[in-house]
Amino acid sequence: MTLFRNNWEGMFFILVALWYVAIPLGITLMYLWVRWLMRTHLWEVKLGYWMLSLILPILGLVFIGAGVVGVNEVIRSKIEQHRLTKVYKAHTWVLQDSAVVAGIHLAPGTKIHFNYDQDMNHKEKAQLSDISALDLSAPTKIFGLTLHKRFTTINGGWKTYLPFDQEISGWPIKKGRVLLTEKGQLKEGYSAKPYVLFQYKIPAESLISLQLGNGDSYYIGTADSSFVINKKTGKLKNPLQ
């Protein structure tokens, strides 16, 4: 699948993107054409040369037109960016005092970023599903885990950070970035220490990732191998299946 229908469309897109080059170049071509007209006796010019000279204004107009489109897109982008910034700011609540929001005890200075459809007149009654992100000012208990830095939605779940090693869904998970499901179960993280599940030894630093569509199976990636294991039955399967 090609990005553009033809080469001309691709070239026009490049000119739009390089509007700051296209406009001056187009004006220059038009200027050269006008200078040529002023210095030339048109009745003495052969038809072929006259037709050839029309390439300059045509290219000039194309360059200028593409540049104008580019400038218009830049202006529209700036306006939209300004609008989104205002909406983002209007849906952000910086706590001056500690508060309980969506059942979470939050420290002063925490920034709560709400979904854009949230009624900010009732922000104190918001549910966790109404929140897109938390910038945590202090370690905070969420889903029974101690988290810090940022807690944000991603792909139907949450991305956050552990300030120290913790157990999640029965796995010993290393501090740092982790992914959680919508309900706070482990979606992805690294093992904090060697771990034995059934008869299988899982070394420290192994990647543990929940298999999509199967809440009981996890992909295990070690330095030497990888496999998928059902955490309830211990059954293995090829990770490519």
Image (tube, rainbow, N blue to C red):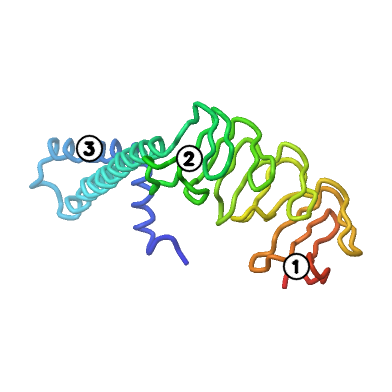
Q: Position of residue 237 (x, y in %)?
A: 79, 72
Secondary structure under the numbered disc 3 in the rendered image: helix
For the residue marked with disc 3, what is the amino acid?
Answer: Leu
Residue position marked by numbered label 2 in the rendering: 113
For the residue marked with disc 2, what is the amino acid?
Answer: His
Q: From the viewer's perspective, is residue 141 above or below residue 197?
A: above
Instruction: Classify residue 211 as left or right of residue 98.
Output: right
Residue shown at the point (83%, 68%) measured from the top left: 234
Secondary structure under the numbered disc 1 in the rendered image: loop
What distance separates the C-alpha of mark 2 from that of mark 3? 55 Å
What distance separates the C-alpha of mark 3 from that of mark 1? 65 Å
Q: Position of residue 67 (x, y in %)?
A: 29, 43
Q: Quadrant of residue 34?
A: top left
Instruction: Classify residue 143 as left or right of residue 21.
Output: right
- At label 1, counting other C-alpha atoms closer than 10 Å, the crowd grade (few under 14, some 14-19, many 20 or more) is some
Residue that lies at the very extreme toward the left in this rendered image: 43
Residue shown at the point (65%, 48%) measured from the top left: 143
Q: Position of residue 229 (x, y in %)?
A: 79, 66
Counting residues from the start of the chain, the first of labels 2 and 1 encountered is 2
Counting residues from the start of the chain, the first of labels 2 and 3 encountered is 3
Residue position marked by numbered label 1 in the rendering: 239
Residue position marked by numbered label 3 in the rendering: 32
Instruction: Classify residue 125 as left or right of residue 233.
Output: left
